[in-house]
Image (spheres, helix red, strand yellow):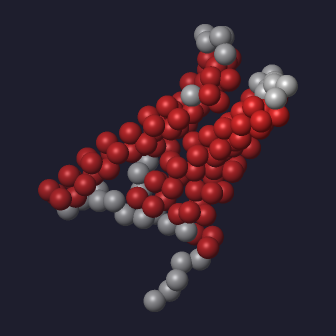
Amino acid sequence: MRLPSIRSTPSTVAAVGGILYAIGVLSWLFANGVHFLSHDTATLAFGASYAAVGMFLTGAVPLYLCSRLSLVTPVLVTFWLLGNTVVEWLYGTHLHPLSSYLTVWPLLLGVAVGAGVAEALLRVTLDRDFDRFGLRPLV
């Protein structure tokens, strides 16, 4: 019996992906004028950690579901939501798309996970009925 390498576990894939996603998105947002402003240190720390944890989870949870259960819709929905934010930012169709992305991340993550739940239910049903498309780990 071979033990999995730490480099190839779903948790490692999710953690590395979440960190890279958070760094990428937060760097892009901060470079375009999104910032935290407060005279209260506790409020400033809460806002910054809320955004950092949110971006980490928004990147990590879909990757974990993909690598652990081979669910692709959470990853696709996450990239679609980020792409939609980029389009809103480029064309000015939303007043504050970048700061909104940081504040409503629980809703965005919920939409991505909800899509994953729907995919999982469909695939479990297909696996039970046709012995195809079951949930299997990718890593």
Please state which of residues 107 and 119 is positioned toward the viewer in this rendering: 107
Viewer can see residue 26 = no
- The residue shown at (63%, 52%) is 17
Looking at the image, residue 86 sits to the left or right of residue 124; the answer is: right
Looking at the image, residue 31 sits to the left or right of residue 52; the answer is: right
**The quadrant where residue 36 appears:** top right
- The residue shown at (59%, 77%) is 5
- The residue shown at (42%, 64%) is 137
Residue farthest toward the bottom in the current orientation of the protein:
1
Residue 92, horizontal then vertical, whole percent: 66, 11
- The residue shown at (50%, 48%) is 62
Residue 89, horizontal then vertical, whole percent: 67, 18
Residue 19, horizontal then vertical, whole percent: 69, 51
The relative height of residue 89 versus residue 119 in the rendered view (above or below) is: above
The total of numbered circles placed on residues is 0
The relative height of residue 57 versus residue 16 in the rendered view (above or below) is: above
Please state which of residues 40 and 32 is positioned toward the viewer in this rendering: 40
Looking at the image, residue 89 sits to the left or right of residue 139; the answer is: right
The relative height of residue 136 versus residue 30 in the rendered view (above or below) is: below
Residue farthest toward the left in the current orientation of the protein:
129
Looking at the image, residue 131 sits to the left or right of residue 16; the answer is: left
Residue 28, horizontal then vertical, whole percent: 76, 32
Viewer can see residue 82 = yes
